[in-house]
Image (cartoon, rainbow, N blue to C red):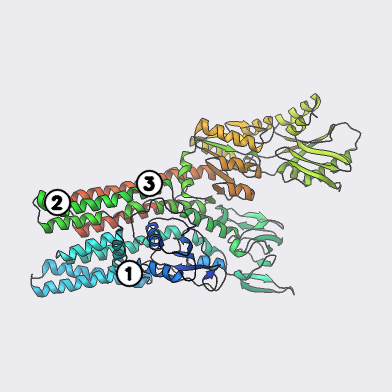
Amino acid sequence: MNTTTSKPSTMPTCGCTSACASSSLASSQASPNNTKDGVSVFRIPTMDCASEEGEIRHAIAGITGVRSLQFQLGSRTLAIDAEAESLPLVLEAIRKAGFKPMPLVSNASDADAQNHGHEGHSHDHDNARFPSGIQKYVLALALAVGAESISFFAPDTRTFQGMGMVLSVAAIALAGFSTYVKGLAALRKFRLNINALMTVAVTGAFLIGQWPEAAMVMALYAIAEMIEARAVDRARGAIKSLLDLTPETAEIRQPDGSWQIFPVSSVVLDAVVRIKPGARIPVDGVIAIGSTSVDQASVTGESIPVDKAPGDAVFAGTINATATIEVRVTSLPSNSLLSRIIHAVEQAQGSRAPTQQFVDKFAAIYTPAVFVLALGVAILTPWLMDWTWTQAIYKALVLLVIACPCALVISTPVTVVSGLAAAARRGILIKGGVHLEGARKIKALALDKTGTITEGKPVLVDTEFVKSEIPEWQVLGWAGDLSAHSDHPVSKAIARSLDPGNSILEDFKVVAGRGVEARLDGQMLILGNHRLIEDRKLCSSSIEARLAEHEALGGTVTMLATQNQVLAIFVVADTIKETSREALAQLHALGVTTVMLTGDNEATAKTIAKQAGIDDARGNLLPEDKLTAIEELQKRYGLTAMTGDGINDAPALARSDIGFAMGVAGTDTAMEAADVVIMNDDLRRIPETIVLSRKTQAILWQNITLALGIKAIFLVLALFNGASMWMAVFADMGASLLVVFNGLRLLRANPGEKTI
């Protein structure tokens, strides 16, 4: 069997139905018949833990004809790619493992199918709605309390004993049916998980006559599991709540010029949508008519409205603040920026952070070790410590409850998921828990200049002509034509200021990191930076002097030249972002060394670095030079991050330990290569990420300490007559709830604050 999703290196032994860990979160899609290209999608209500994914994989492992499995634990869905004759065998194996696969049917689009599992989840073990689930478990708890009351207060007669036993059996059946189903399935395969441990503990307690306590343990366990699952889903669902920001309908212009309201799912590319003041924008698009201000907090995390005019991009889920606009649709609703953000965070939530991997490996050793200890207590202590067999077995059963690694295993993913969601709400898209944890270790940060430190909107501030036989109007026309064919911000600035000469370009070529060249009107011309002109041996002492003067003032110099001489010098200047100086000061306060890497000349790089407060600056760098610089910084400082927004930054972003791409101004290549995307181009989000990473790490270790500390205390109490079974389960589930709610604090955290 081939599995296409990543498999946890070590499966945790916890089998709780709360979302105690995340594994692969591959996208699952379905068509109206629940299949697409041979893939069938099923919802499994009690599958939201990595160990439960492991149980299902183990159950299916021996079946032939299964091509791949795609687990999406967040939405409790499983996509099965299997031969038609193998699918019934797969489903039967899943049922025998104690799970109930239900076909996931969609009558809309693939995107609808993917999001279907996000809606209407039930979180109790028997797939009942939350109100009926809580009523059932409260009733089970009441029956268990009744059994305990009879045991404590009623006369010790057969009648009252029988009543207590009946109440206990009813409580156990009501609260623990699904636990028994999955526990017995695990025991048949000699696999230890929480369901197996609880099955053995409750059954053992009942058999030695402690049926009131067995009932209390099962009722408390079921209630705590349900509360825990709801709390964990709050973390997992935090980012999905952004889906509610997108309107369900859109007002679309018809061919006859009239306007009609249709579901957003029916909107097509190039349709024109009208949005009134105060309404949320339903689709991604470009403003065709009208000017307004847009609140883009849902995308960038910045609530200050941004002015928009015709030609400017707007995004689904943002708010049109001031005036009616008409927007031409550029992306289908299922592929909007907001949808892509949500999908990326869901994928990130599925990645296993380093601390989580450590905890899962520890739990895989911890549970069998305590199980062996419990077995030793049951068998050896009657001989070694003169305990009765009943006392020994009871203590062993208490140890089995303590052996549950629930609180330990759940301590990590809920914190990481909360951290990822908190970052996304601030316009910081982190592509995995490994990067969230790693950001706290950043020692050096390399920064591109244009669009990262500066506004990325340079303007032409000066033009100097070099004496030649070619008229100035011709020089400007050629410069306008060449610059218009380049994507570099400096070339764009020149093109915006010059009128094109309308010459036909032949043999056009981009010289990476240097400029462009082409044949115009029979003349081979180059438009490039200082380095390119030097390479072509066209620099004279007088030109060098003029360049030095402009570069010393922070200007970026571009020259137009033939194969024989320089024709003109164009000076372009960019302004430093208002937020860059503040961000760099915050980075220095966090102990991070900052280095600017730019393709611009050395003098301009040094000037901009001094103005912005950057520790070091390196100019005249090609993409491969930036790559070498990153490797040098890693050797010198340790963990090195890189931030940039252009195609030329992509190699360095990929080579750095953590790459930050500036989302709004950045290219798709840079955003793909990066590990973190800053959606609002605010450099201050980088120190915020580092602070959030440090908060996350602190809470992770708080949770691990809490979980292990409580278990250690009750382990000692159990061995010295200080703990009963129901106290042990209450403490274990209490520890689980403590670590869950402690992790959820990150959802309320402001990454800008430096304290927890």
Relative to 67, 741 lies left or right: left
In the structure shown, which secondary structural element does the residue marked by tag 1 occupy? helix
| Quadrant of the rendered image containing residue 190 | bottom left
**Outermost residue toward the top in this view:** 541
Cα distance between the residues tagged 1 and 2: 41 Å
Quarter of the image with the C terminus is top left
389 and 417: which one is in front?
Answer: 389
Q: Earlier in the sequence, mark 1 or mark 3?
A: 1
Residue occupying the point 71% across, 43% down: 489
| Mark toward the viewer: 1 or 2 | 2
| Quadrant of the rendered image containing residue 341 | bottom right
In the structure shown, which secondary structural element does the residue marked by tag 2 occupy? helix
Cα distance between the residues tagged 1 and 3: 34 Å
Q: Name the residue under label 3.
A: 358
Residue occupying the point 68% across, 29% down: 603
| Mark toward the viewer: 1 or 3 | 3
Q: Where is residue 555 in the image (x, y as percent from the top left)?
A: 72, 34
Asked if residue 213 is positioned above or below residue 735 in the image, the reply reads below
Q: Mark 1 points at which residue?
A: 134
Pointer 1 and pointer 3: residues touching (CB < 8 Å)?
no
